[in-house]
Amino acid sequence: MTLQGRRAIVTGSNSGIGLGIAVELARAGASVVLNSFTDRPEDHALADRLAAEHGVPVRYIRADMSKGDDCRALVDQAGGCDILVNNAGIQHVAPIDEFPVEKWDAILAINLTSAFHTTAAALPGMKARGWGRVINVASAHGLTASPFKSAYVAAKHGVVGLTKAAALEVAGQGITVNAICPGYVLTPLVEAQIPDQMKVHGMDRDTVIREVMLVRQPSRQFATVEQIGGTAVWLCSAAADQVTGTTISVDGGWTAL
Ligand code: NAD
């Protein structure tokens, strides 16, 4: 399977799942734009390393996905794209009545509204070329809920809704829009939740991982960033031409429960 000649943008891709997806797209031959809100030498070095490893053009563009103008500027600066992966996301865990308003606003902006802006900016070029893939990284929390994650669950359910609406708008034009719904993947975002969960549940690290995080993941195994990346590459293949407006769970059976 080759994605040679395809241009991809992956938001929030200097770590975790976004980086895993970027690596798999580059391995499949796509040129890739990496993104985050920082502009450090190591961000650009990461792009150079990926380019050297996979022999494809890779560059890093700073853009803050909490800001609509930045989201649209990212697509413009990239010169459009054939594959748009909306992956940037943050998390905060607290009961609703103690949930900081600024955290709610940031989670909705970065996890949901950014995908509206980037999709709006990317679709005209995809329509003109008659081919496109929009891949939204939602979550098992786009399909089910957990307590203390109100903003995240609301945002991810919103991403699934946006995915369906966008898919219907471009159906039959060579463009598909889908959401990947990972269960738990051990990335920096999940690492950061462990201390909070230890506090909330009064448990040690191993017990939180086994009894809280993976308790709803029947495989009792984390999904890997390579598996999420492979799913994204498959969504870009001709085999997935008629897969649109849907969710693909990579969650060890979580949503089958
Ligand atoms: P991560 O913290 O490793 O990566 C998040 C990425 O988003 C980073 O590159 C970060 O720099 C970027 N980011 C954060 N704020 C940004 C902003 N304002 N502008 C631009 N970039 C920004 O986390 P991850 O686990 O790799 O999460 C990636 C996506 O996968 C998120 O949307 C998350 O909700 C989703 N997800 C993760 C899991 C999991 O278990 N790790 C499960 C389901 C869904």
Image: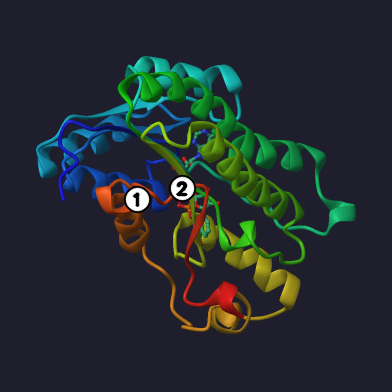
Q: Amino acid at mark 2?
A: Thr
Q: Using residue 2 as the reference point, say whether residue 127 is left or right of it.
A: right
Most foreground residue, 69 or 122: 122
Most foreground residue, 175 or 160: 175
The quadrant holding residue 212 is bottom right
Instruction: Indicate the colouring scheme.
Output: rainbow
Instruction: Say which element carries label 1.
Output: helix
Vertical order, 71 against 105 (above or below): above
Q: Residue most toward the right?
A: 97
Vertical order, 211 against 91 (above or below): below
The quadrant holding residue 166 is top right
Q: Position of residue 83 (x, y in %)?
A: 34, 35
Which numbered dot is residue 141?
Answer: none
Instruction: Work out how far the residue at label 2 is from the one at label 1, CA to CA, in angstroms.
Output: 9 Å
Whichever of callouts 2 and 1 sits on the residue coming sooner in the sequence is: 1
Query: Which residue is under mark 2?
Result: 244
Q: Position of residue 210 (x, y in %)?
A: 55, 83
Query: Which residue is under mark 1?
Result: 235
| Quarter of the picture holding the C terminus | bottom right
At 30% from the left edge and 60% from the top edge, which residue is drawn? 226
At 11% from the left edge and 38% from the top edge, which residue is drawn? 52
Q: How many marks?
A: 2
Crowd rating for badge 1 (residues with CA inside 10 Å; few <14, some 14–19, many 20+): many
The quadrant holding residue 22 is top left
Q: Using residue 228 as the reference point, say whether residue 248 is left or right of it.
A: right
Q: Position of residue 155 (x, y in %)?
A: 67, 46
**Which callout, 2 or 1, points to the residue nearer the camera?**
2
At 26% from the left edge and 48% from the top edge, which residue is drawn? 238
Q: Position of residue 74 (x, y in %)?
A: 43, 21
Whether residue 205 is visible, yes or no, is no
Q: Amino acid at mark 1?
A: Leu
